[in-house]
């Protein structure tokens, strides 16, 4: 067992639990434990809520511009420590450093910066009612809880805390138990930047800690990122205290490639939308519908580029662009989907063998990029979220039916269309039941653009000005300017 053991972060400092309970965190690229983390027990959790309530009082009373300046200071620290933080993400998640250094910390910092800039502009309204009038105030909610998934741990912590804090709320954040360190580093950075104690607390643990937060009457909102099934449980429990919820859940998104598309660009999108972060991205376009006229050419280009350009290996090697899956259990789950695809009659074009790995990485949870063709809509790999590097290629020959097939899923997170016919592009996108859509692009998620799911993929939005509404509530104030009329 590792001697390195981290603690929970409450009221601006690390806090020891009283039970002594810890859990171990494994580097997915080696299969070896890297550190221990203390589990938040009832003492830690009660302290986290108490300090978050106190922190909220201090923070919400500040001028929004002052809050913004403090958050901007945190943004500077995040960018200065990009390499150190990216390395933490690599060791916790197994993703390549090449990605983490370019995307994870940067996109987290961008979102905090965006909301720090936007929140001071939040304003109420006023309306005359003859003699009387009313006005509205946009007030923060109070204590918000964030519960994160393991694929983008630090980015998720930033995407939740950025808008929450900018709007004047405090936040208790529970990262995934697979990847708990990034959020602790963010908490330290917030404190260093001048965020008052208790405004951002981090509690560690698995479902039990999440359930505790979800059911606590002193918490006003839950912002959750994770699987649909867990999201439903979280929402049901949050209903017992009528908490506001934001749900960022899973997907099985369609990517539709028409016969007139730029095929090289479409192949890039299909690879990004299936193999970036080893396929562990919620918006992945895992159902790739390719027009039958270009299917052969598409597959040739795709397989050529997988062979030539994907470098699986030690994620810390800057040349590596394809890392390890999060855990042994997850790898087993992804392999079971691959097995089901074979038995249900899909044709596997690649991914049968794993390339040689450095000795140090031979205990890691690697699984090569895998492509199935001749898939049909009823196959398990086409219907269920796999969350691994498994692409299902389906053919189509008609716009109306491909739209209907693309929408034939309980998920509705994302969708992509590749075509050079400008009218078709918008016509198709407008009919797809998905919250995040791309035309001749895939996966881009700038801070300005709201993201979130339709149907079972979520409720509410993250990023963009839209999100300010999800972290504030409206108070209406009626002002009587004359005698009060009353029958009594
Ligand atoms: P998960 O649902 O297993 O866990 C998510 C979080 O919930 C973890 O922190 C976990 O400890 C906690 N949790 C588990 N049970 C709980 C309970 N009963 N009550 C409260 N909290 C509980 O998801 P995961 O495996 O960590 O992440 C992968 C999933 O996340 C995929 O489905 C993926 O699509 C989704 N995801 C969605 C987005 C998005 O923005 N839409 C982003 C990233 C990941």
Image: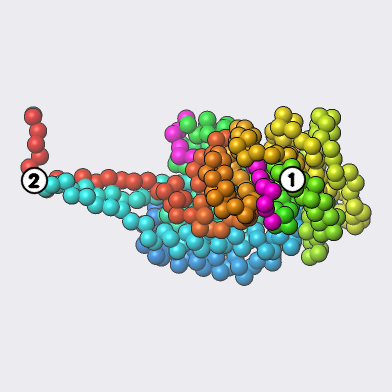
Compute the Cα span from label 2 to label 1: 75 Å
Q: Secondary structure at mark 1?
A: helix
Please say if the residues under marks 2 and 1 sit with CB atoms less than 8 Å apart: no
Figure label count: 2
Please indicate whether residue 370 sits to the left or right of residue 61 in the image.
Answer: right
Residue 5 visible to an observer of this rendering: no
Residue 252 on the magenta span: yes
Q: Is residue 392 visible?
A: yes
Q: Residue at x 47, y 65 (%)?
A: 70
For numbered disc 2, what is the local secondary structure? loop
Q: Nearer the viewer, residue 68 or 470?
A: 470
Q: Which mark is residue 293?
A: 1
Whole-percent x, y for residue 450 in the image: 51, 51
> Residue at point 45% right, 39% down?
244
Magenta segment range? 240-262
In what quadrant does ligand 1 lie? top right
Would residue 204 be counted in the magenta stretch? no
Mark 2 and mark 1 lie on one chain; the one further toward the N terminus is 1
Split into 4 quadrants, where in the image is the C terminus? top left
Residue 188, horizontal then vertical, whole percent: 58, 60
Assess disc 1: are there few (<14), some (14-19) or many (≥20) residues with their C-alpha within 10 Å of its C-alpha. some
| Image-quadrant location for residue 407 | top right
Residue 414 lies in quadrant: top right
Q: Which residue is mark 2?
A: 482
């Amino acid at each position: 067992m590792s001697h390195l053991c981290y603690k929970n972060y409450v009221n601006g400092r690390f806090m020891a639990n009283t039970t002594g309970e810890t859990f171990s965190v494994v580097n997915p690229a080696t299969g070896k434990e890297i550190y221990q983390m203390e589990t938040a027990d009832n003492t830690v959790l009660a302290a986290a809520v108490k300090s978050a309530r106190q922190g909220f009082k201090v923070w919400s009373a500040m001028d929004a511009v002052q809050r913004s300046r403090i958050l901007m200071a945190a943004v500077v620290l995040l960018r200065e420590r990009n390499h150190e933080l990216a390395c933490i993400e690599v060791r916790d998640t197994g993703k390549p450093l090449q990605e983490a250094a370019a995307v994870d910390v940067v996109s987290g910092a961008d979102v905090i910066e965006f909301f720090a800039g936007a929140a001071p502009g939040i304003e109420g309204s006023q309306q005359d009612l003859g003699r009387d009038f009313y006005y509205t105030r946009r007030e923060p909610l109070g204590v918000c809880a964030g519960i994160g998934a393991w694929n983008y741990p630090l980015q998720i912590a930033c995407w939740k805390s950025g808008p929450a804090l900018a709007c004047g709320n405090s936040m208790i954040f529970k990262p995934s138990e697979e990847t708990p360190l990034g959020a602790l580093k963010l908490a330290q950075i917030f404190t260093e930047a001048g965020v008052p104690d208790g405004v951002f607390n981090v509690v560690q643990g698995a479902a039990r800690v999440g359930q505790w937060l979800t059911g606590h009457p002193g918490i006003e909102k839950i912002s959750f990122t994770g699987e649909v099934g867990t999201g439903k449980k979280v929402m049901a429990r949050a209903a017992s205290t009528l908490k506001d919820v934001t749900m960022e859940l899973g997907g099985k998104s369609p990517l539709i490639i028409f016969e007139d598309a730029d095929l090289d660009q479409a192949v890039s999108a299909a690879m990004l939308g299936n193999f970036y972060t080893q396929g562990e991205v919620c918006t992945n376009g895992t159902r790739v519908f390719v027009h039958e006229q270009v299917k052969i050419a598409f597959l040739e280009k795709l397989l050529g580029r997988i062979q030539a350009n994907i470098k699986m290996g030690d994620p810390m090697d800057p040349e590596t662009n394809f890392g390890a899956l999060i855990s042994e259990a997850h790898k087993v789950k992804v392999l079971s989907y691959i097995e089901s695809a074979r038995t249900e009659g899909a044709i596997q074009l690649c991914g049968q063998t794993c390339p040689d790995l450095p000795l140090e990485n031979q205990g890691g949870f690697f699984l090569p990029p895998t492509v199935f063709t001749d898939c049909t809509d009823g196959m398990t790999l086409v219907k269920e979220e796999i969350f691994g590097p498994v692409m299902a290629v389906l053919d189509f020959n008609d716009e109306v039916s491909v739209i209907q097939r693309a929408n034939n899923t309980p998920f509705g997170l994302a969708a992509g269309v590749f075509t050079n016919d400008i009218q078709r592009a918008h016509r198709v996108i407008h009919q797809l039941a998905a919250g995040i859509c791309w035309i001749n692009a895939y996966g881009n998620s700038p801070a300005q653009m709201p993201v979130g799911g339709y149907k079972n993929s979520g409720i509410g939005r993250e990023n963009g000005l839209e999100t300010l509404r999800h972290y504030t509530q409206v108070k209406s104030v009626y002002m009587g300017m004359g005698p009060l009329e009353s029958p009594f």
